[in-house]
Image: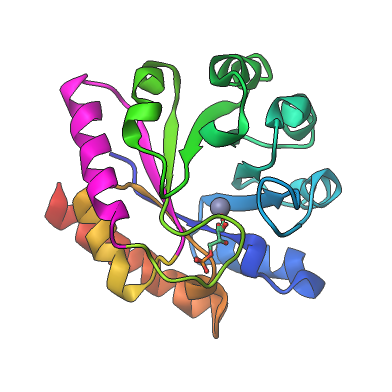
């Protein structure tokens, strides 16, 4: 299984965004997690296409775009065109999740679907065949710097068991409150794509990133 740290630029210093992305690249990051918020599906507003288009010009990282947006079907093509490699939509935000998945595929991006902490795995289990990644939110979507919701560990386990039972190749991504204490818990539960915002960006970005990547490697080797 491929394990990746996916730093969330929501916690970046936007005055130095390009520079900070370069630092992540130097430290060995491959995936960049890009949180788009619309002020409707979630209370806050972050950024959208123009920012992604700008950073795409100077980065070859895998752009993992997390749409915390109501009716995201409206924007899938636009996000793919401005450089998203993977697009994740929320099950709760789509009227027709199957159609949203198809639109992402048609746009040539990898497909992610996400569930909020209160949404059961059961709600998306019949789509596992059609997606590359399931993003299990481990905080309420909308803000960085929140505390990991412990109840989510069971959902990660349940999902990994289901994926294994069906012999599928689906990533489990976790997002929210991932830090030194929770990293091991989520990897042991079955997560392989680890989003982290504040844990990466607080303090020395490059040193933190190297340390976290090493730690992910260490834990994943124990788990495999
Ligand atoms: C929250 C976002 C996250 C956020 C995580 O709604 O989806 O990606 O940046 O931040 P931390 O790692 O600080 O919890
Ligand atoms: Zn996110």
Specify whether residue 41 is painted magenta: no
The region drawn magenta spans 150-176
Is residue 62 in view?
yes
Is residue 22 in view?
no
In the depicted structure, whether residue 98 falls above or below residue 63: above
In the depicted structure, whether residue 86 falls above or below residue 209: above
Q: Answer left or right for 120 relative to 142.
A: left
Q: Nearer the viewer, residue 136 or 20?
A: 136
Q: Answer left or right for 192 relative to 56.
A: left
Q: Quadrant of the N terminus?
A: top left
| Residue drawn at x 31%, y 47% as measured from the top left | 191
In the depicted structure, whether residue 221 falls above or below residue 128: below
Colour scheme of the picture: rainbow
Give the residue furthest to the front.
Answer: 118
In the depicted structure, whether residue 100 falls above or below residue 15: above
Q: Answer left or right for 34 relative to 123.
A: right
Give the residue furthest to the right.
Answer: 50
Query: Where in the figure is residue 21, as x and y percent of width and height?
Result: 66, 63
Query: Where in the figure is residue 38, as x and y percent of width and height?
Result: 75, 48
| Residue drawn at x 38%, y 74% as measured from the top left | 211
Specify whether residue 157 is painted magenta: yes
| Residue drawn at x 86%, y 47% as measured from the top left | 50
Query: Where in the figure is residue 82, as x and y percent of width and height?
Result: 79, 36
Image quadrant where residue 166 sits: top left
Give the residue furthest to the bottom.
Answer: 203
Query: Where in the figure is residue 74, as x and y percent of width and height?
Result: 77, 26
Image quadrant where residue 134 sits: top left
| Residue drawn at x 66%, y 52% as measured from the top left | 42
Q: Nearer the viewer, residue 135 or 4?
A: 135
């Amino acid at each position: 299984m491929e394990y990746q740290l996916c730093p969330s630029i929501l916690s970046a210093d936007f005055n130095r965004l390009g520079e900070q992305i370069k630092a992540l690249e130097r430290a060995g990051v491959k995936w960049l997690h890009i949180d788009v918020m619309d002020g409707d599906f979630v209370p806050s507003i972050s950024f959208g296409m123009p920012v992604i288009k700008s950073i795409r010009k100077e980065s070859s990282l895998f752009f993992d775009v997390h749409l915390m947006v109501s009716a995201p079907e409206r924007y899938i093509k636009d996000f793919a065109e401005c450089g998203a490699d993977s697009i994740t939509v929320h099950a709760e935000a789509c009227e027709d999740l199957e159609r949203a998945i198809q639109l992402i595929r048609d746009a040539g991006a990898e497909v992610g679907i996400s569930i909020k902490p209160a949404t059961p795995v059961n709600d998306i289990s019949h789509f596992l065949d059609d997606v590359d990644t399931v993003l299990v939110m481990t905080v309420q979507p909308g803000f960085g710097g929140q505390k990991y919701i412990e109840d989510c560990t069971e959902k990660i386990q349940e999902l990994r068991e289901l994926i294994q039972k069906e012999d599928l190749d689906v990533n489990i991504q976790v997002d929210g409150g991932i830090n030194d204490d929770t990293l091991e818990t989520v990897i042991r539960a079955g997560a392989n794509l680890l989003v982290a915002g504040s844990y990466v960006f607080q303090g020395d970005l490059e040193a933190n990133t190297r340390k976290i990547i090493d730690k992910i490697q260490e834990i994943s080797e124990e788990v495999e």
